[in-house]
Structures are given as C-alpha cells and as structure tokens.
Amino acid sequence: MSACVPARAADSDRTERTHPPHSPPPTGPRRFRIASADVSASIAVFLIALPLSLGIALATGAPLQAGLVAAAVGGLVAGRIGGSPLQVSGPAAGLTVVTADLIQHYGWRTTCAITVLAGLAQLGLGCLRVARGALAVSPAIVHGMLAGIGVTIAVAQLHIVLGGTPQSSVPDNLRALPAQLANLHPAALSVSLLTLSLLLLWPRVPGRVGRVCRTVPAALVAVAGATAVAAVAGLVLPKVDLPSWRNHALAGLPEGPVLGLVGAVLTTTLVCSVQSLLGAVAVDKMVSGRPGPGHVTRSDLDRELLGQGAANIVSGSLGGLPVAGVAVRSSANVHAGAVSRNSTMLHGVLVVAAALLMVPLLECIPLASLAALVMAVGIQMVSLHHIRTVTRHREVLVYAVTTLGVVSLGVLEGVALGIAMAVGVALHRLTRTRITHDEKEGAHHLHVRGQLTFLAVPRLSRALHLVPPGTDVVVALDGSFMDHAAYETLQDWQSTHTARGGTVAVTGRRAGVRIAEPAALSSVNPAVGPEEAGASDADCRCRPWTAWRNHQCDRPHSLPGGDRRPSPTEAENGAHATEGTDSSHEGEQVPTGTGGHDLMRGITTFQRSTAPLVRGELARLAREGQRPTQLFLTCADSRVVTSMITSSGPGDLFVVRNVGNLVPPPGAESGDDSVGAAIEYAVEVLAVRSITVCGHSGCGAMHALLDSDPDGAHTPLRRWLRHGRPSLERMRMDDTSGPRPRLADRTPADAVERLCLTNVAQQLEHLRAHDPVARALKDGTLELHGLYFHVGEAQAYLLTERDEEQVFDRVRAVDLAM
C-alpha cells in the first residue's frame, strides 16, 4: 500500500486525460465508460423504484403511469443536471398528500400544470442562490412535516389494505375505519399481510443465505411474492391498470382561482425543495461515512435546486408526478457502491424500458400489495430517532404541533403552525431566565440560568440587592448571551459591592470577556495582581483553545515588590523575570514567576471553563478506555497543536512527539525503543487505522541538521539528530539524480523547507520498516499519511503521488467528504 493518500480524487464524471499534456488532442471521439459499480447500483435502485413509483401514484389518485414518468424524468433530468451526484429523484412519499389534495381540487391536468410552475419557481430560487437558506428551517418542523405526511399516507392506505376505498382526509378516514373493519375483504387483507411480512422479514434472514438474500431489495421481493401467491391462489383482486400511452394525459392550462393556484405552487415548491435539499445533505453524510477509497464530489445545493426544477418542468409537461429527492432510493444507491451520477441516470433508462416493455407483467400486481408497501413507507416516516432527537433538544412541542397540523389541516397549514410554534418557543427561551441565590461556606452564590436580556434585568437587580454588603459573592452565568442592559446592571452593582469591601467573581463568561473588578480577580486567583486585573482588555488576544500566557493579552504583569514582569516578546529579546514566591496563603507557597503563574492560570481556567464541558466525555473515556483511530507522529515544536490542526478531541489521536518528527528505523544500534514501543502499542494494541507523520515549517531540528558539524560534541541532541541524517542524504541525492518532494502551488522557500518535506517522506520509509506496520499494511488494515503544516500560513499540505513525484498538495474543503 502506498504511504500517500491523494488529497483529492478526480471527479468520476470527467474523462481521464489519455494523451500527454503537450501533445495535440486525439482526433477520434472519446469512449464513454460506465463503472461496474454504477451499473450494479442502478439495477438495485431500479428494483426499488419500480414498485414504489406505482404505489405512490396509487396513493395520490393519479394515473399509475404518472409515477413511472416521474421516476424516469427524475433519474435522467435531475440525475444529469442536479448538484448531488448520488441522490436519486422521483415521485416521493413526502409529496403524496400534497399531490392527492391538488388532484382532488383541480384535476389531473391542472395538477401537472402546477408541477410545471413549481419547477419554474425552483429554477428561479436556484438562480438566486438561496438553497442554503432553505436549510434554515428548524429540523423539528421538517421532521414533523414528514411524520404528518407519513401518518396521512398510512391511514389512507389502510383502507385499501382492508379492501376498501380511502377518503379525502385523515379525520374522514378515521371516522370510516370502524365500518371498513366490519366489512373486511379477506383476499386483499391476506395479500397485504403477506407483503408486509416479506417486507419485514426479508432483511432479517440470518447467516450466509441472508447476506445473499439482502442483495435483492425487500420491496421488490414483497410485491413480487404477493403477486405470485395471488396468481397461484387465483385471488380476484383489483390490479394495476396501465392504460395505453396513446391515452396518457399531459399537462393543460391551469384552471381555478388565482390565489388557490398560487398557494398550490408555493406548497409544491416548498415541499419539493426542502425534501430535496435535506436529502442532498444526508447523501453527503452517507458518502463521507462509506468505507473505501472512492471519492464523490460534495453536493452543490444551488445546482441541485436547478436540477429539481428542470425535472419538475419536464415531468409535469409529460404528465408525471412532482419530482423530489427520495431518501430510500438515494440510500440504496450509496450503499450499493455508486461512484457517479451515471447510476442515477441508468436507473432512469431502466424505468423507461420497464414502462415500455413490462406492461403485461406490471398489470399482474394487486393494488392491495402496493398499498401495503406505501403504508409501510408512511409508517417509517414517523422516525423514533427523530422524536428522540427533538425531545433531547426540547423541541418536541414544535414537532408535535407540525405533525398534528399536517394531519388535520394540510401540509402548508401544518408547516405554518410549526414555524409559529418554533418562533414562540424561541421567544419563551429568550425571556425565561432563572436566578437562584444561596449561601455556602460563607460565600453567596447567584446562579443565572438562561439568556440575560433587558427583560430579565428587574429580576437580576432584585436578586443582586438581596446580597448583604461586604460579602464574598460568586455569580455563575449559565447562558450564551448577555445584552447591554444586563451587562451594565451587573457591572454597576459589582462596582458598588466591591467599593463596600465585598468581593465578586463572575464565572461562566466567554474567554476574553471580563466583568470582574481588580479585587474580585485577586480573590479568585491570588497570582493575579491588581494592576493586571484592572488593565484594559483592548489588546486581549484570548482564544478558546488555550489559556496560556503567550496566547493571551500582551500587557505587563506585576511581580512582588512592584517590579514589572516582561512580556513574552521582551523575554525573547533578553529580558528575564525574577522568580519568587507569594506567601500570602499560610502553609503554601504560590510561585509568581512566569512559568508558575501561567501554569496556575491555565489550570484555573481549565477547571472553571473547560472541565465542566468535557467532564462527561472524559468520564466515558475513563470507563471505556482509549480507542483512537490515528497515530499522529509530529515534532515537539510548541506551535504545532495537533488537536487544533485535525479538529480532534479527547480519545481521537494517539500522539507521539519528538524533536524533528523522527521515526528511527528498527535495529540494535540505530533503533529507539521509545518511538518503537509507541508504534507497536498503537498498531497492535490500539489497532489504529492510520499513521500520520507531520512535519512543519521553520523546524529547528532541520536547521540543526543543515548546520551540523560532524566533529562537534556528542550531546544528547546531536545523538538524537543522527536519525535525521538519512533525510539529509536523500535531499542531497534528489538534488542531483531524482525528483524532489515539492509543494503543489510553489517551490520550497529555502533549503530548510526542502529538508522538512524530504524528512516527512523519509520517515514514512522508516515507518514501513517496523514489523507491526509492515504486517498491518500487508493485511490492508493500516494507511500511512504524510503531512506538512506551514505555521505562518496555517495551511496543511497532504503528501500525494503524482506522475512518480511526491507532491504536498493543499487540503481543500472538498476533501472533507473523504
């Protein structure tokens, strides 16, 4: 396995270059190739789409051929133009209620015209590039809308399952259900139960037989099995009736009240757009979590909106149902291993072939079987996972109101109610502030939960003035927002309280925002002097990832006796702080030198601000043990922050740091047991899946290698740097005979940077020589990566192989889907 993983793969939709870059282009046409993974994925999607398209058309009351038209157009048009390569579009269950209502009120031809107008509206929104704005809708509203649509579908299809005819609304269907149960149709019920049983049990077949069975979609097996049993048993049931394509109804001019038509267009546009955009985002997540080296371009949401609009225009014009991204088919496409949009388009071709050649076979399917299939899809739209999620985020009320609104009134009305409820909940949270006051160990504690706005100022002022003068007070702010009125109220009271001899400590505030007065800060941390506490915050450079002194405020610090402690810049230029102790606390000595002060302040900030946030995660890791996925071997340089570069948290990285990010090769004399033990432990005990060697710009070890004197003193540093001499020799050989490791967008700035790049490649070679690494590479359970981090640019470069050259390429945003 190569030690380098490409930072970005070529788009599979593009044809690879087949001639040298400076030669004339070929005269003949390029051959169009379809990957075998796309062919197999298209067949899997087609087998799911065929029965679902017929079932959704049945549920809406549209001609059954309209479902096939929408499936074909969704695959060919939306698949070719859309911005999500692996999302499969077609007639969606989320549009069933909307379309059924339109057909009932306006008729089929006008419904087709509304679909065309909705497509034009989607084209306009796509041109305005507002696709990201559609994702601002609360997930609780979207999930509630889908759940309401699912309930509506399930209740309506239940009547067909029982052998009857559904009514126009959920309340009417519920009222008619007792009478329907009293007049069951045994044949329809038996076929429906058989369909549901196969649908439920087919994915659960155990063992090797089950793995083979799961290659055939459960929906196809359920409908085909029920159809075969009905035919063998000779059951008399209503079946699929596909009229001749010569009699297929196309779109007509819209007829009806203007306001009603405008509302219908807006509703169709909203549901189609939101479902498609959310589906595209979900597909990106599924692709990023899919194992394997294949890379698929992330979705362009504005282009996806344009593709959906074009598909709806074509589908409506040809007499098809509205088109949107479909979660079931998209999920099947991703899991089947599709690598490009060719799978989506090929599935559309297969639907066209089936609609033209398989009409006699399709007309054998009982309607009860399709109704059972669609009812199961509707039930699955009420997701328990979504309910748990909105409950955890305290948005279950928004979810419930949206669901009930869609079920009782309709989609547009239900969504409007959900939006109104979401706004009400947000305002309630903004105004609901709880302030508690208690006394512990002689100190008064005020705990403020919620957002501090001007609406909470009266309660805050009342609670503050209940605190006796001259006492020690801790004000804990448990919220993310404080407006100017609340800030001034708290600051004014704090000034008055400290002037009367009291102390105030404000906790829970964001880094870089101070409210406490000098005395208050001194009481919280004795190492902080009054001069520092009262200093201006204008130059504060505090950041959330660190509390250490040289990353914070460049202001002078006081030492005992009135001496001024120099800033880090001054210290680097030769100024030295005087070490000392502060004996203000009886029985303990508090160091006040630069190192001791920084250490105390860092630990204090961690315990106060960070520890409460990570305590739960660290407790889980303490119980379960560490399970990192990566070994990250980098330099000991203080500017290289591994967790920040890789956006990692506790338990993610197993980190080894040394001077020069060196990996000594195994061997009695040249080896190093410390690094070798870490590699062995990471690979064989922790079973990491990747190892990264990370160099960086301005590396002092590389400077030392270039300036090394073979006859110099053999200090510990010199003895350690001997492991870097192969990198120095490799760079000198590359200068004369071989290609040099280089950066993609520029040449190395100097010899030090060239050596830094060469050193990363050389240490990967050393890494392969270790037995645990060699075995894991042979088994295919481990990958090696080379990384170069330019400190000044804050830019990471990933080592790739390009035309037998080793190139450090920028890690762009598109690589986040890998």
Image (cartoon, rainbow, N blue to C red):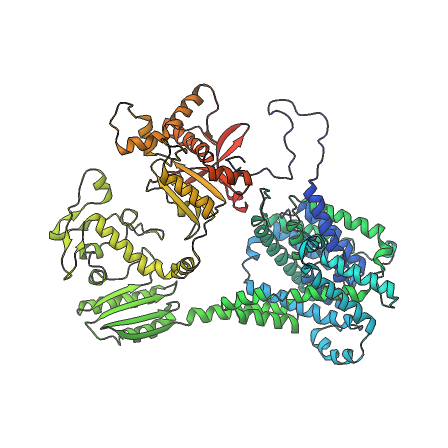
Q: Position of residue 653 (x, y in %)?
A: 43, 48
Q: Quadrant of the N terminus?
A: top right
Q: Residue at x 54, y 38 (%)?
A: 778
Report if residue 256 is visible in the image. no
In the figure, residue 63 lies in which quadrant? bottom right
Q: Nearer the viewer, residue 371 or 59?
A: 371
Would residue 491 appear left or right of 295 to someone viewing this image? left
Q: Position of residue 459 (x, y in %)?
A: 34, 75
Q: Position of residue 308 (x, y in %)?
A: 67, 52
In the displayed structure, would residue 725 be above or below residue 387?
above
In the displayed structure, would residue 458 be above or below residue 337?
below
Q: Nearer the viewer, residue 421 or 706?
A: 706
Q: Residue at x 32, y 51 (%)?
A: 542
Q: Nearer the viewer, residue 261 or 358?
A: 358
Q: Nearer the viewer, residue 408 or 796?
A: 796
Would residue 158 appear left or right of 689 to someone viewing this image? right
How many numbered marks, from 0 up? Answer: 0
